[in-house]
Amino acid sequence: LSKVSNELKKAIEIPINDQNANGIVKIKTAEPGSIWLLVSLGAFSAVNLVGAICWTAAVLRKKRAEAKIFEEHAKTLEIKNDTLISLVEAQKEQLKNILDAEARLIMNEHYNVNDPETLNRLKLSITTVSSLIDKGTKFLPASTEKNVQEKFPNYNNLNLIESTIKMLKDNNI
């Protein structure tokens, strides 16, 4: 419980404190059995921020899984070791770029600052939430409003999640 609490601090409390929008993180209850925490965020903007972080973490998790599948496929093609290493390094760089772009989008939409320290803490939050999702953690809003629910990923269909960053489309194809 202590470890999960520490990860939740990195994942939720630090970004909300950075956001400076009167959000607070308070553990209201902890249920016995499986770890079930009810956390109060104190402000609607904090709920939106946590939703954006969870969505991005799920996107990052999906991209990481796709990279692993590609790496395993490349190994079956008997590609030369140097080329395989180059492909793996290129994928790591791509994941780093995706994380950076997604974190910048969240910072631009949810923060009043453009600070490298805040960006790095946000990246830590996203990777921590991604890791927690990998371990089976679900971040669910208490609100039943559809617009709030849509800000959080559907954990039953994580493989279908898409980035919120608008992709360029080639209209000539």
Image (cartoon, grey):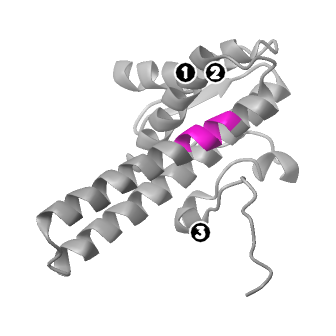
Taking the view exactly as shown, the residue that stands out farthest to the bottom is: 173
CB contact under 8 Å: marks 1 and 2: yes
| Residue 15: numbered disc | 2
Q: In the picture, which quadrant includes the C terminus?
A: bottom right
| Residue 94: numbered disc | none
Query: How far across and down, in percent of the image, does residue 28 sit?
Result: 63, 19
Q: Residue at x 64, y 62 (%)?
A: 162
Q: Is residue 64 visible?
A: yes
114 vs 69, left or right, is right
Q: Which secondary structure, mark 1?
A: helix
Question: Callout 1 environment at 10 Å: few (<14), some (14 to 19), or many (20+)?
Answer: some
The residue wearing badge 3 is 160
Residue in the foreground of this view, choosing between 116 and 25: 116
Q: Residue at x 77, y 23 (%)?
A: 111
Q: CA distance from mark 1 to mark 2?
A: 7 Å
Region rendered in magenta: 99-104
Query: What type is the residue that disc 1 sits on?
Result: Arg
100 vs 134, left or right, is right
Height in image: 123 above or below 72? above
Residue in the foreground of this view, choosing between 87 and 30: 87
In the image, residue 93 lies in the stretch drawn in magenta: no
Tally of numbered tags: 3
Query: What type is the residue that disc 2 sits on?
Result: Pro
The residue wearing badge 1 is 121
